[in-house]
Image (cartoon, rainbow, N blue to C red):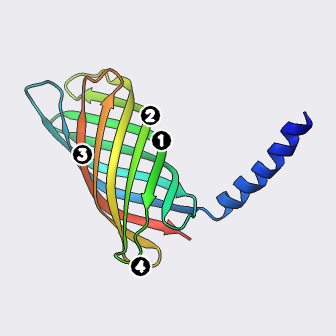
Amino acid sequence: MKIWCMCALPLAVLFSAKVATAQVGGYALFTGADLDTTSTTTTRIYGPTFGFYADFPTPVVKIGGDLRGYLLNGSSKQHYNGVIGPRVEVDLPIVKLKPYGEVLFGVGSYKELSTTDATQHIDYEYIVGVDRKLIAIFDWRILEFSYCNYYNGTVPTKALSTGLVLRIP
């Protein structure tokens, strides 16, 4: 029991100090996606993406987490989801660019508006993108590519997004 307490206290102090100075931000993006409902047809869907992220404040490579939600509609179909997961960002201050990558998991809903039933599912998503610093608290998310799919692989969604990021100092 003594060894556990001796390890837990320094870890708690370390994590508390890092979280207190973490970089936190929120973002709003416009997203356009291809929803592959069958192997022969592709449906274009559009809509907003909202989210929050937090990164530990390390000099160049930042590790953190992201929580986001999509509200995509089009061609009598809708795909809504919410995902969360780890993120890695590389800060390149000389060129004011911040490329990042994420692997997210969550829940989603797919519905054809001609029917009343929505299909709920587990989502997984891979994301790569790049932000550019505009001013002290705003970044422009230049481009983000995401690949989202159900756990069983029936409706893959490939999306491109752009928008603004508000960094909270």
Give the amino acid at mark 2.
Answer: Gly
- For badge 1, the amino acid type reads Ile
Secondary element under disc 1, as helix, strand or loop, is strand
**Residue 59, relative to residue 159: is it above or below?**
below
> Label 1 vs label 4: CA separation?
27 Å
Which residue matches tag 4?
A: 135
Distance CA(mark 1)–CA(mark 3)? 17 Å
Name the side, left or right, on which 160 lies relative to 101: left
How busy is the neighbourhood of tag 1: few (under 14 within 10 Å), some, or many (20 plus)?
many
* Label 4, label 3: how far apart the Cα atoms are: 27 Å
Quadrant containing the N terminus is top right
**Label 4 neighbourhood size at 10 Å, few (<14), some (14-19), many (20+)?**
few
Mark 3 Cα shell of 10 Å, populated few (<14), some (14-19), many (≥20): some
What residue is shown with label 3? 159
Residue at 37 percent of width and 76 percent of height? 134
Gap in angstroms between the C-alphas marked 1 and 2? 6 Å
Q: CA distance from mark 2 to mark 4?
A: 32 Å
**According to the image, label 1 marks what residue?**
84
Q: Which quadrant would residue 73 be assigned to in this image? A: top left
Considering the numbered disc 4 on the image, is that residue within a helix, a strand or a loop? Answer: loop
The picture places residue 24, in percent across and down from the top left corner, at: 54, 61
Q: Nearer the viewer, residue 60 or 165?
A: 60
Q: Which residue is mark 2?
A: 106
Between 22 and 45, the one lying in front of the other is 22
